[in-house]
Amino acid sequence: MAKSNNGKFQGADIKQNYSFNAVNDYNVRTYLLKHLKNKQTRLALIDEHKRFPRGGPTLPGAPPPLQSSVLAQLVDFLRTRPQAGKHTIVETIPWSEYSIGLLPGKRGGVVRILKERYPTREEAEHAIFKKRVKALCREYGIND
């Protein structure tokens, strides 16, 4: 197998999604990091997500309430993170209890269900959002 310019075997970059991850990192640093570094702005984004974790309800004759562009970018970014260890919603009692699970990252693996329980999907959705934001902040050295 031939080596590429960076010394790795060809195909290694594709396997590790190098281009995708590099673009994601660029987008975080360019468009999101300034909002996450500012604690007040970050808390405002978290509060906005709490009010509309799935974009908000639609009313007849009115356009759906949309999340702000920064929150929409943040949510989109968090949804594209690698699957292994990613938080997900698990409906433990239909329509009345939701838990958070950790994805195994491979087909056929077992989702590990955490002890946290929420009465609505929206509350579980928001809890996951906060966990993902906290992890992203840690990844970029934001510790407050």
Image (cartoon, rainbow, N blue to C red):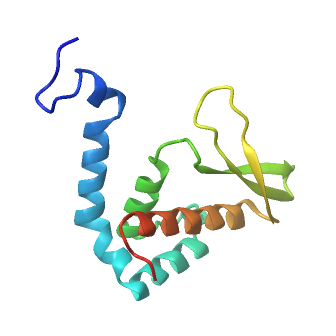
Along the line of sight, which residue is nearer the eye, 143 or 76?
143
Q: Based on the displayed image, in which of its 4 quarters is residue 127 positioned? A: bottom right
Query: Residue at the top extreme?
Result: 1
Q: Quadrant of the N terminus?
A: top left
Question: In this view, which residue lies farthest toward the front?
Answer: 7
Using the image, determine if residue 55 lies above or below residue 106. Answer: below
Query: Residue at position x 59%, y 75% from top?
Result: 51
Residue at image location 58% in from the left, 65% down from the top: 131
Above or below — where is 104 with respect to 72?
above
Tell me residue 47's x, y (percent).
54, 80
Residue 65 makes an appearance in the image: no
Query: Left of 85 or right of it: where is 100?
Result: right
Residue 100 seen from this side: yes
- In the rendered image, residue 110, in percent from the top left (x then y), is placed at 73, 35
Relative horizontal placement of residue 87, taking residue 80 as reference (left or right):
right
**Nearest to the observer: residue 84 or residue 75:** 84
Q: Position of residue 89 (x, y in %)?
A: 70, 52
Q: Residue at x 32, y 67 (%)?
A: 32
